[in-house]
Image: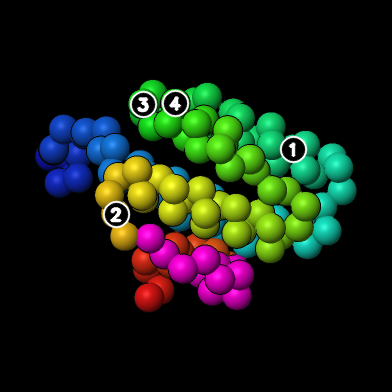
Amino acid sequence: PNPPPSFSKPLRPPSRAEIGRASWRYVHAMAASYSQEPVLREQADALAWLRAFVKFYPCQLCSQEFIEVCGDLPPRLGSREEYAMWWCEAHNRVRNDLSQSLRRCEVKSLLSAGMDGKTLDEVT
């Protein structure tokens, strides 16, 4: 029998842009579900996750540049709102470095988009 059409094309890895869009969608959704009042353990877990994410990110240049972003703009883990705002500001920093337009960081919009698994670009 012939294989299904989806198996007849060679698989290709996602592009850097595809990985980037999916990553931003994921981190904004994660921030929207972060604890309202995280205890120290939750804050440490979030920081450990971020370190692992950056370490294993499939684009080495992107990873190194995001480490610089974190050095200039340290993660804020004290609350869901702080964390969501930090991700938005970090995302804007990356956008600025790529000469892309910046987004307005408003907590209510960020949390609403994140809860829907979207970025601000996908809801505005």
Q: Position of residue 95 (x, y in %)?
A: 36, 50
Identify the residue shown where x is 19% and y is 45%. 6
First along the sequence among labels 4 and 2: 4
Q: CA distance from mark 2 to mark 1?
A: 31 Å
Identify the residue shown where x is 15% and y is 46%. 5
Amino acid identity at mark 3: Leu
Above or below 21: residue 102? below
Residue bearing the label numbered 3? 61
Name the element at disc 4.
helix
Residue bearing the label numbered 4? 64
Q: Is residue 3 visible?
A: yes
Amino acid identity at mark 4: Gln
Residue bearing the label numbered 1? 45
Q: CA distance from mark 3 to mark 2?
A: 18 Å
Above or below 8: residue 29? below
Q: CA distance from mark 4 to mark 1?
A: 21 Å
Name the element at disc 3.
helix
Amino acid identity at mark 1: Asp
Residue bearing the label numbered 2? 100
Q: Which residues are magenta?
A: 102-113
Is label 4 in contact with label 3 (beta carbons under 8 Å)? yes
First along the sequence among labels 2 and 1: 1
Identify the image quadrant of the N terminus. top left
Above or below 71: residue 88? below
Identify the image quadrant of the C terminus. bottom left
Q: Is residue 30 visible?
A: no
Crowd class of label 1 (few under 14; some 14 to 19; many from 20; radius 10 Å): few
